[in-house]
């Protein structure tokens, strides 16, 4: 039981950690600075938590489905609209803030733009600072400006540091002759993911590519073992 609490190994090198760390710092600084110039420091600093969380996804795990452009833009839009609606109807209380976060999650799932930091944004907007509350519906302007600046930062920095972003749709794995009727396909993986009934930040196509890449490495290892005997 206790073994399940141990952290899994990270499959990236320290150079990638450093690359992501610099990107997170620069992206968050740029996004908050631009918001501060347009809407003032009080409003901008109130959004720094969700923006910092988004930066971790966009720079450290940019290949994940939760870090793609529609996820951050759609997620922030859903969370902002839901939070302001809830605040108008139910007031600005802890209970209404938590309800807004839950409702934002449902909307993001429906629109396929799940972005975890948007849950924090919903809480932040309901329990907002006086300057943000005074903006009323115009509070969506700094929210979307921050999201857009963070996305632009990720697009520029990730590609300049040779990390392709946004992720291209995975191409179907080439068929191997003779075709094995029991070979795992993306459709099989899609059904398996549905059976698990849990949020998993990877697409069936990515899993299929991973399986085929693993098979290639296994074949190379097997051939190497034959020649070393």
Image: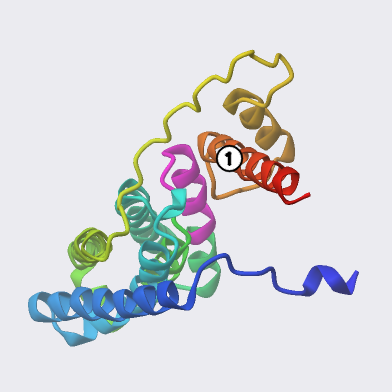
**How many labels were placed on the picture?**
1
Which region shows up in magenta?
101-113
- For image coordinates 38% across by 57% down, the residue present is 79
State the residue in front, 102 or 202. Answer: 202
Residue 92 is inside the magenta segment: no
Q: Which residue is mark 1?
A: 207
Vertical comparison of 209 with 120: above or below: above
Please tell me whether mark 1 sits on a helix, a strand or a loop. Answer: helix
> Magenta residues: mostly which secondary structure?
helix
**Picture coordinates of residue 169, whole percent (x, y):** 38, 36
Give the image quarter of residue 92.
bottom left
- For image coordinates 23% across by 81% down, the residue present is 29
Vertical comparison of 127 with 99: above or below: below
Would residue 152 appear left or right of 210 to someone viewing this image? left
- For image coordinates 36% across by 70% down, the residue present is 55
State the residue in front, 11 or 103. Answer: 11
State the residue in front, 8 or 12. Answer: 12
- For image coordinates 24% across by 79% down, the residue present is 26
Give the image quarter of residue 143.
bottom left
Residue 102 is inside the magenta segment: yes
């Amino acid at each position: 039981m206790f073994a399940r609490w141990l952290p899994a190994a990270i499959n990236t090198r320290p150079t990638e950690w450093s690359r992501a760390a610099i990107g997170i710092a620069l992206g968050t600084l740029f996004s908050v600075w631009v918001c501060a110039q347009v809407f003032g420091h009080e409003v901008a600093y109130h959004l720094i938590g969700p923006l910092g969380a988004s930066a971790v996804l966009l720079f450290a795990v940019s290949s994940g489905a939760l870090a793609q452009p529609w996820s951050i833009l759609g997620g922030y839009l859903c969370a902002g609209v839901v939070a302001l609606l809830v605040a108008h109807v139910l007031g600005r209380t802890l209970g209404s803030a938590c309800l807004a976060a839950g409702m934002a999650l449902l909307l993001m799932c429906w629109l396929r733009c799940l972005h975890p930091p948007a849950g924090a944004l919903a809480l932040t907007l309901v329990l907002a600072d006086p300057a943000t509350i005074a903006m009323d519906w115009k509070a969506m302007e700094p929210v979307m400006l921050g999201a857009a600046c963070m996305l632009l930062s990720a697009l520029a920095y990730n590609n300049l540091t040779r990390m392709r972003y946004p992720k291209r749709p995975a191409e179907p794995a080439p068929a191997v002759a003779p075709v094995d009727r029991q070979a795992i396909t993306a459709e099989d993986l899609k059904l398996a993911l549905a059976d698990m009934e849990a949020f998993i930040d990877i697409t069936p196509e990515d899993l299929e590519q991973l399986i085929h890449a693993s098979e290639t490495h296994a074949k190379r290892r097997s051939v190497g073992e034959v020649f070393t005997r």
